[in-house]
Image (cartoon, helix red, strand yellow):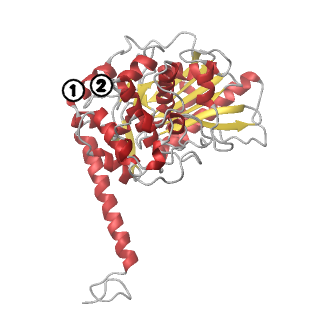
Amino acid sequence: MPDLIPGAPPGRMPRARSLLLVSVLILLVAAACLVAWSFSCSIDASTDPAFAAREHATNVAGTAPDDSFPAGVLRLDSLLEPIRARDRIPALACAVVRGDSLCALGVVGVRRAGSPERARWYDRFHIGSDMKAMTATLVASLIEEGRLRWNSTLAEIFPDLARGMRPEYRGVTIEMLMQHRSGLPDDRNIFRLLRLCGLPGSPREQRLRAMQMALAERPARAPGTRNTYANMNFTILGAVVERVTGDSWESQMRKRVFEPLGMDRAGFGAPHTPGRVDQPWGHALAGPRVFWVGSVLLPAAVHPAGNVSLSMSDWGKFAAIHLEAERGCCRLLSRDSFRRLHAETLPGSHFAAGWGVACDDTLGTLLEHAGSDGFWYAVILIAPRLDEAILTAANIGPARGEKACFDALRLALRLGMARNGTTLSAGSSTRAGSSPRGSRPH
């Protein structure tokens, strides 16, 4: 029998090629399982049907009674459509907040590729890890109530579980988790995500179990020494919220962030009702083809790190409190809490608590983040010197969504700078409108 691979002994394959083939097969099987899972059911429904029913009730609430565009808000549709058409993405959205108010908004395209339903200005978009700042804000509210301290340690919060933690993690503080300084490894890969998919129990039980698994492993580096982006930091913060309140992270997010800010079109998971095109759907690429995805592929353990869907105007309400805080006008939290949430953790690290930090010669200090679950893409930029926050989102993953979102952000940024009579300097040190520093997508 002739050799199938030149130079290989009959019946054998070179070790490197054999390992490569096995790795490719594993990836193909994992991808097939995830795609099949996404089309077959909602993640929450597969783990806790009652929880899924509650979340669906939340997501369908607040439907706009008509299509009337907000009065006094500049419509950006004509500026966004060329970007959307050029990059061939289903829908693209952009909102601009000035001070405490929405001043510009645009949503163009369709809710699902191949369907005629147009995306509406009040539609919800999944923002991935951009909502980490919301979890950090929620935790800060508990600190202000005295239920936690910035330096509360994991061993103090979970004394019954401390023995199962590696010694290095017992002294990790709430602030370290918010700032990605816990020592946990970067977990943005399919294998670490798959480990969390089969966890049993309610979302609260899954988060606690995920935390125990993570804290039993060797740290990637000594806690407190460097920033390493890890979604598990915010999974653990979700478990912390649930331990100190006796309530779910989802419920506390509604009570402490969504409801006080009037974010009545914010919910968890995919925006749309399964099987219906009543909201935007997520999309991905298969070669040159765009295909829609039936649900957000995130296990409940990961939700505190990035599983919120909301309208652009509601997202603007959240951005506004962080923008206003930079001018000393504080709502929801104290000035000291906002200062700690926005401060760069280590010199030159570009990390804050749920934010990336950049500095530009013209625009000054910027807060920023990008988020994606693979089927959506979203970016937020807060520019205090301009007194503006810019939010962009697309219902397709980073292969096409990233460029479209950043081009829309650049366009809105130029409009704001033109209003102030400024331009980016030639020696600009920021990557604003290019790619967020210190905050790679989820």
Q: Which residue is mark 2?
A: 55
Spatial distance from mark 2 to mark 1, Cα to Cα?
9 Å
Q: Amino acid at mark 2?
A: Glu
Q: Is residue 267 above or below residue 235?
A: above
Using the image, determine if residue 7 lies above or below residue 151.
below
Q: Are marks 2 and 1 in contact (CB under 8 Å)?
A: no
Image quadrant holding the N terminus, namely: bottom left
Q: Left or right? Give the position of 153 relative to 250.
A: right
Say which residue appears at 35% left-offset and 64% top-offset.
24
Residue at (28% x, 27% y) in the render: 273
For the image, the number of numbered tags is: 2
Kind of element beneath mark 1: helix
Indicate which disc residue 50 carries. 1
Q: Residues within 10 Å of mark 2 (few under 14, many from 20)?
A: some
Numbered disc in front, either 2 or 1: 1
Whether residue 305 can be seen here: no
In the depicted structure, whether residue 291 falls above or below residue 119: below
Task: State whether residue 111 appears in this view.
Answer: yes
Q: Nearer the viewer, residue 82 or 336?
A: 336
